[in-house]
């Protein structure tokens, strides 16, 4: 089966689902987000949004409060109640400026809240802040663990070992996988969680694909012995440990 994932990964490029019924705002959001390198999908109501989310889990949801049918708040509750989706960051969009509504939105599980009308600049800043907090693998911050250093901006990985610092050659999927594991160190992820987080897609990729890429990742890290950081947790999945043990 063919793999299905984006071919090139610009730093800070997130897949964003916009749930908004108003065509004008929908267009405006799509235009601005795409312009900033994000991969945008649009849904006009909660029902359509759920279909899209379950097809391919987005990195972030921009959710309008007032939707025809089920409201944005109801959708946010559904997302938070679903174990597979509960980690997806949500930013609520609303025309209301009421403090009480803001509190309700945040209680529902939204990560942030933005009141219409908003400037594209403010929106981009909020998105970046939420991703940095909730999905550090989406940001361009350098990560270093046990002498293994990953630079998302330069798309480079270096490993320290007895002979000094050396560059390590990783394929694009291995890079994304390592970036995710390094920004979520010490936590165990199942194959299906890794598919959602790293591939963003459950539908077109088989779970054993994860094993193939873990194997490739380990061999890419072997020259500096950082392959030892990647641990197999029997019956569960994989984890990146913070020390070479
Ligand atoms: Ca609306």
Image: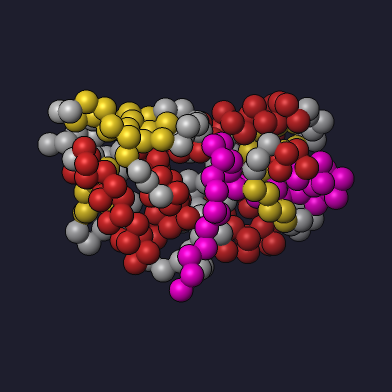
Q: Residue at x 76, y 56 (%)?
A: 44
Q: Please say whether residue 187 is one of the residues in the magenta stretch.
A: no
Q: In this view, does 107 lie to the left or right of 136?
A: right
Depth order, front residue of 234/143: 143
Depth order, front residue of 221/136: 221
Q: Residue at x 69, y 62 (%)?
A: 48
Q: In this view, does 87 lie to the left or right of 216?
A: right
Q: Can you see residue 71?
A: no
Q: Which residue is drawn at 57% across and 51% down?
A: 58
Depth order, front residue of 64/29: 29
Q: In this view, does 150 lie to the left or right of 6?
A: left
**Where, quadrant-wise, is the C terminus in this rendering?**
top left
Residue 150, quarter of picture: top left
Q: Position of residue 115 (x, y in %)?
A: 75, 31
Residue 32, quarter of picture: top right
Q: Where is residue 30 in the image (x, y as percent from the top left)?
A: 75, 45
Q: Residue furthest bottom?
A: 1
Q: Is residue 217 left or right of residue 235?
A: right
Q: Is residue 122 above or below residue 11?
A: above
Q: Please say whether residue 11 is one of the residues in the magenta stretch.
A: yes
Q: Position of residue 98 (x, y in %)?
A: 74, 28
Q: Residue at x 54, y 53 (%)?
A: 7
Q: Can you see residue 110?
A: yes
In the rendered structure, which segment of residues is drawn in magenta? 1-30
């Amino acid at each position: 089966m063919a793999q299905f994932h984006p071919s090139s990964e610009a730093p800070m490029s997130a897949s964003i689902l916009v749930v908004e019924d108003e065509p004008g705002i929908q267009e405006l959001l799509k235009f601005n987000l795409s312009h900033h390198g994000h991969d945008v999908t649009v849904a006009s109501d909660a029902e359509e949004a759920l279909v899209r989310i379950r097809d391919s889990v987005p990195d972030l949801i921009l959710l309008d409060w007032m939707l025809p049918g089920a409201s944005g708040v109801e959708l946010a509750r559904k997302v938070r109640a679903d174990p597979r989706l509960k980690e997806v960051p949500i930013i609520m969009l609303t025309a209301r400026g009421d403090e009480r509504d803001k509190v309700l939105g945040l209680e529902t599980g939204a990560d942030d809240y933005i009141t219409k009308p908003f400037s594209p600049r403010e929106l981009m800043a909020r998105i970046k802040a939420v991703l940095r907090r909730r999905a550090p693998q989406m940001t361009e911050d350098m990560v270093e663990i046990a002498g293994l250093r990953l630079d998302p901006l330069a798309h480079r990985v270096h490993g320290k070992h007895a002979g000094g610092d050396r560059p390590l050659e990783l394929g694009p999927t291995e890079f994304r996988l390592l970036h995710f594991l390094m920004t979520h160190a010490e936590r165990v992820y199942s194959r299906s969680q890794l598919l959602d987080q790293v591939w963003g897609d459950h539908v077109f990729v088989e779970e054993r694909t994860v094993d193939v890429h873990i194997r490739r990742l380990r061999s890419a890290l072997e020259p500096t012995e950082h392959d030892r950081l990647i641990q197999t947790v029997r019956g569960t999945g994989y984890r990146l440990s913070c020390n070479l043990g």
